[in-house]
Each structure stands twice: as structure tokens, then as C-alpha cells.
Image: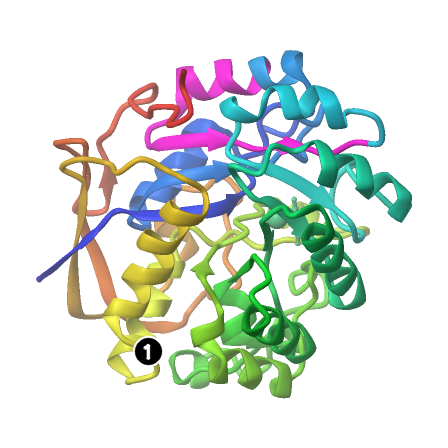
């Protein structure tokens, strides 16, 4: 049995308010604890989006009542809220700017709308962008011009990791995260890890493999692995949609990920593709530093690094009821999670109650 600190996931969609048939603060944070994650940063692309004092209050009320693990809530950048969200910055996880197409209504198509946010946001926490390829390059440039730290969500392409590497070498304040699905799956949902080799080599159906950024080529995935030292954080981009929605006419993009991240990463450790220290650096130390998060005292995860088993959605806690890693054989099981001195997860069961989770930005 090994003991590691509780993981921090800087990128989760908990769907509350507005789409609680997919997930809510209760089921989403239960899923987090089952995956060894004790602190989640919740994304603002809900219905309504979280982008002013009133909607922030709605999300924080729901989280206060239902979250089982600790949390903070993102604010979303809209076309005319730069000043008002900046005034709420201390209560928020960070600012999220959607610069490319994805799920939800928050999107800043017009680059001239970016200026106000980059100039107003205080910069104690980063501006997090959903920005792919060239829009990522433009966002890094604008953050640099305004002297603000920028964190690039879910990088997936070789050209992205190479540009971030070069920007860091030039002293630009940029950090980034990668999701397990962009490390372990290629286009079509084809497994790119020994763990999935013998079960899922046909990949995923078109609807189930929909995700933004899209699953990339084998060469892109290899470039991410080769440049892991450039990548600051692991993040799930836990984006639950139900199976009926994923298998329906207009499949929404997104994968659940909270309960599969640590087992997949531990499997990579057992295969010598990364170290346990990489997990602690990128899932605890770096996100805590980048987002200025407090330490969680008496908080740890007990892992059986030798347990070999199959990933099964039927054993998971997310409301969405599926995983793109169904049937994968992994090595490394979360056995027990202790959060602020209390057992929160043990023997496959979440025991932390709804409302136990604390807002780490409470002032
Ligand atoms: O695939 C995705 N789903 N990518 C995103 O950026 C948003 C997410 C969602 O909210 O469903
Ligand atoms: Zn996301």
C-alpha cells in the first residue's frame, strides 16, 4: 500500500445548475473521491453559465449543500462582463475563457472581446483558456502583452506542446494541463496504451468518441508523452453526458474521467512510462501553486499499486453511467481516501456526506 496526497483536479464539469440528469455536486464529488481526487475546480459552462454574482451564488449554494469533497468554482468570460467578473475574482477558482467551439453557450469568438478580460482580470489566479492550435498561440501572446498568467486547458496536439515549450523557454508565464484521454486514446477512441490493447482495439463509436479538443493522431499523442516535462498538470476535463445522449442523434462532446485518471496514471507508472513523483507533481504540487490553493491538512489517498482489475462503469459513482475506458485492464487501485482527517472513501464506497466539502475560496 502506498500513500499519496489527495489529488487536485483543476478541470471538472459538475453540471449544476441546469443539467443535473448528467451529474450534480453530489454525484460528481462522489466520483472525485472514488478517484482519489479531494479538491475539484468546477467549470462555469452550466445552464445558466456562472458569470456574475447571482449565478456564482447559485452554484456556491448548490455546492455548499451537496459537495462531498473540497471545491472552488470558476467564473466564465462573457462578451460584456470583464469588470464584474474581475470584482469577484477572489471568490473564484480562476477565470475560464472559451475561445473555441465546445459544449455550452460561453464562447468569445471575436478576438477583440479578449482584451477587456486580459486587462481586467487581477492575475492572482490564471486566466484558463479553452484555446486550440492557433487560437492558443494568440491567447498566449495576448496574456503576455497584458502581463497576466495563462493556463492552457487540455492540450492535445504536438504543435501546442511545442509552442508552450518554446514560450516557457522565453520566460512567458504560461502553464498547461493534459487529460488522460489525450494521453491514452487516439482518434476514433483507439487505445494507445498496453492497458487497453487486448480489449478495445476497435475503438469507440463516433458518438462516444466525441470530445473537445478532439482525440488526436498517434503522432500527437506521442509528442505529449515525449514532452511530459513541459506539461504542468493532469486534469480530467470530467465532462459527463448520459449514454442515451452519447449514442443519440447529436452526441455532445465529453468524457467522464474522475474515476479513471489515477488508475490509468498508476498503470503508466507500473509500465515505467512515468513516475509516482510525476503524478504528485502534476496532480498536487503544481495545481496548488498555479491556482494558489490551500493545503488540505490530514488528507491522503491509500493506493494498492499491485491490484490488477478491469475498469467498469457499473462500479462508478458518476451519474452518466459510462466510461470510454470500459474493460481496460489497469494496475493500481484507490483503496481509501482521507479528507481533512475523516475517511471519505473506503472499500469502493463513498462515506463522506453531502455538504462535507469546503469551498477553498471562502472569504
Ligand atoms: O468535450 C468537452 N466537453 N470539451 C469541453 O471543452 C466541454 C465539455 C463539456 O462541458 O461537455
Ligand atoms: Zn472542460
Q: Nearer the viewer, residue 29 or 21?
A: 29
Q: Which residues are magenta?
A: 58-78
Residue tagged 1: 274
Label 1 sits on a secondary structure element that is: loop
Q: Nearer the viewer, residue 164 or 213?
A: 164
Residue 232 included in the magenta stretch of the image:
no
Q: Is residue 247 visible?
A: no
Give me the residue at 71% from left, 19% from top. Answer: 84
Q: Is residue 323 left or right of residue 270?
A: right
Which residue lies most toward the left here? Answer: 1
Q: How many marks?
A: 1
Q: Confirm or reject: label 1 Cβ below 8 Å from ligand 2.
A: no
Q: Residues within 10 Å of mark 1 (few under 14, many from 20)?
A: some
The image shows residue 81, relative to residue 324, as above or below, that is above
Q: Where is residue 356 shown, x and y percent of the image? A: 29, 22
Q: Is residue 335 visible?
A: yes
Give me the residue at 66% from left, 65% from top. Answer: 209
Residue 62 included in the magenta stretch of the image:
yes
Image quarter of the C terminus: top left
Image quarter of the N terminus: bottom left
Q: Is residue 39 left or right of residue 341?
A: right
Q: How is the image coloured?
A: rainbow
Give me the residue at 51% from left, 36% from top. Answer: 124
Q: Quadrant of residue 110?
A: top right
The image shows residue 354, relative to residue 205, as above or below, that is above
Q: Where is residue 203 shown, x and y percent of the image? A: 60, 77
Q: Where is residue 70 shown, x and y percent of the image? A: 35, 31
Q: Where is residue 160 shown, x and y percent of the image? A: 66, 72
Give me the residue at 65% from left, 40% from top. Answer: 96
Amino acid at each position: 500500500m502506498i500513500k499519496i496526497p489527495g489529488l487536485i483536479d483543476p478541470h471538472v464539469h459538475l453540471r449544476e445548475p441546469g443539467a443535473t440528469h448528467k451529474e450534480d455536486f453530489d454525484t460528481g464529488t462522489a466520483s472525485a473521491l472514488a478517484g482519489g481526487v479531494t479538491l475539484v475546480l468546477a467549470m462555469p459552462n452550466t445552464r445558466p453559465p456562472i458569470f456574475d454574482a447571482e449565478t456564482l451564488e447559485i452554484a456556491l449554494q448548490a455546492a455548499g449543500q451537496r459537495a462531498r469533497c473540497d471545491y472552488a468554482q470558476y467564473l466564465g468570460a462573457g462578451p460584456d462582463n470583464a469588470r464584474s467578473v474581475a470584482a469577484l475574482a477572489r471568490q473564484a477558482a480562476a477565470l475560464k475563457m472559451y475561445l473555441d467551439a465546445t459544449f455550452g453557450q460561453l464562447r468569445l469568438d471575436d478576438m477583440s472581446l479578449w482584451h477587456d478580460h486580459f486587462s481586467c482580470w487581477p492575475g492572482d489566479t490564471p486566466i484558463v483558456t479553452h484555446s486550440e492550435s492557433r487560437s492558443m498561440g494568440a491567447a498566449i501572446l495576448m496574456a503576455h502583452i497584458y502581463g497576466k498568467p495563462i493556463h492552457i486547458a487540455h492540450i492535445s496536439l504536438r504543435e501546442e506542446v511545442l509552442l508552450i515549450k518554446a514560450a516557457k523557454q522565453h520566460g512567458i508565464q504560461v502553464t498547461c494541463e493534459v487529460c488522460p484521454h489525450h494521453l491514452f486514446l487516439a482518434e476514433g477512441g483507439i487505445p494507445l496504451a498496453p492497458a487497453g490493447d487486448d480489449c478495445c482495439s476497435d475503438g469507440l463509436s463516433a458518438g462516444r468518441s466525441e470530445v473537445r479538443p478532439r482525440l488526436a493522431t498517434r503522432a500527437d499523442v506521442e509528442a505529449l508523452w515525449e514532452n511530459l516535462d513541459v506539461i504542468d498538470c493532469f486534469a480530467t476535463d470530467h465532462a459527463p453526458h448520459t449514454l442515451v445522449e452519447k449514442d443519440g442523434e447529436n452526441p455532445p462532446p465529453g468524457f467522464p474521467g474522475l474515476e479513471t485518471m489515477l488508475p490509468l496514471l498508476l498503470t503508466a507508472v507500473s509500465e515505467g512510462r512515468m513516475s509516482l513523483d510525476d503524478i504528485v507533481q502534476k496532480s498536487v504540487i503544481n495545481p496548488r501553486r498555479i491556482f494558489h490553493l490551500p493545503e488540505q491538512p490530514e488528507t491522503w489517498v491509500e493506493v494498492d499499486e499491485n491490484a490488477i482489475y478491469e475498469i467498469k462503469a457499473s462500479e462508478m459513482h458518476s451519474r452518466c453511467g459510462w466510461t470510454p475506458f470500459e474493460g481496460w485492464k489497469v494496475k493500481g487501485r484507490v483503496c481509501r481516501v482521507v479528507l481533512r482527517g475523516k475517511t471519505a472513501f473506503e472499500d469502493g464506497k463513498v462515506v463522506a456526506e453531502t455538504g462535507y466539502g469546503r469551498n477553498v475560496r471562502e472569504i
